[in-house]
Image (tube, grey):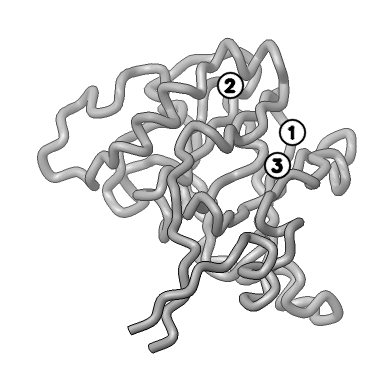
Amino acid sequence: MMVSKVNRRQFLKVSGIGTGLLLGSSFDVNAQATDKIKVIQIRSNYRIGRWYFDPVGLHIQPGEKVRWVCTKWGGSATAYHPSNNNHELRIPENAEPFDSGIMIQGDYDPNEAQAANRATFEWVFEEEGTYDYYSRNHERLGAVGRIVVGSPGGPAEKPLGYGGSEGRAPGWPDVKTMLAWLDSEKIVREKVVRYPMDILERSFPLELSDD
């Protein structure tokens, strides 16, 4: 068996992955935003083997709307709530849980209204407090985000597993890492917190086999 090493540029060329998608660093959070709508992209990064939300932390005021845009098929924006696959409650107790369902790629068919609706999901946040959410297919990869509405508060400010884990959906290690990094006071202070590429980065072998 022969194994040949390829450099990063060659690998991207043969695999058809553009550098913009790979790095995931050119997205302007304000590109699709208005005074009352903030935009979060659901992205994937092959180099680090991750799906993630960008921005991963967002501060808004009560009554503001957030729009998630899926850049590749299969992501979701799903609140941490018992009604969503028996997850731990990590949104304000009086808040209604949200769930986009599985979303398709954002540029799947921009001329087809139904496809465009499936590529985006919007939610108006009325209750003040802290909201944690995840992507259904990628939670174990650390695909979680946090939105602080007004002032931080509520169950999301408690440690993961605060109510016990028996019978609950599993608490993945990478989720713990990301939520520990996503300090609510930092989100309030900075307003928009971009995804930290170095936090969960892992190496990936760029080798192709001739077999």
Q: Which residue is drawn at 16% across and 35% down?
A: 165
Q: In this view, does 24 lie to the left or right of 28?
A: left
Residue 128: numbered disc: 2
Amino acid type, residue under disc 1 in the picture: Glu
Placement of 198 over or under 21, stated as above or below: above
Give the amino acid at mark 3: Val
Residue 3: percent from left, percent from top: 41, 76
Q: Earlier in the sequence, mark 2 or mark 1?
A: 1
Residue 126 falls in image quadrant? top right
| Residue for badge 3 | 66
Label 1 SS: strand
Residue 162, located in which quarter of the rendered image? top left
Mark 2–mark 1 Cα distance, whole angstroms, equals 11 Å
Residue 63 shows in the view: yes
Residue 141 badge: none
The residue that mark 1 highlights is 64
| Residue 115 position within the rendered picture, expressed as x and y whole percent measured from the top left | 71, 77
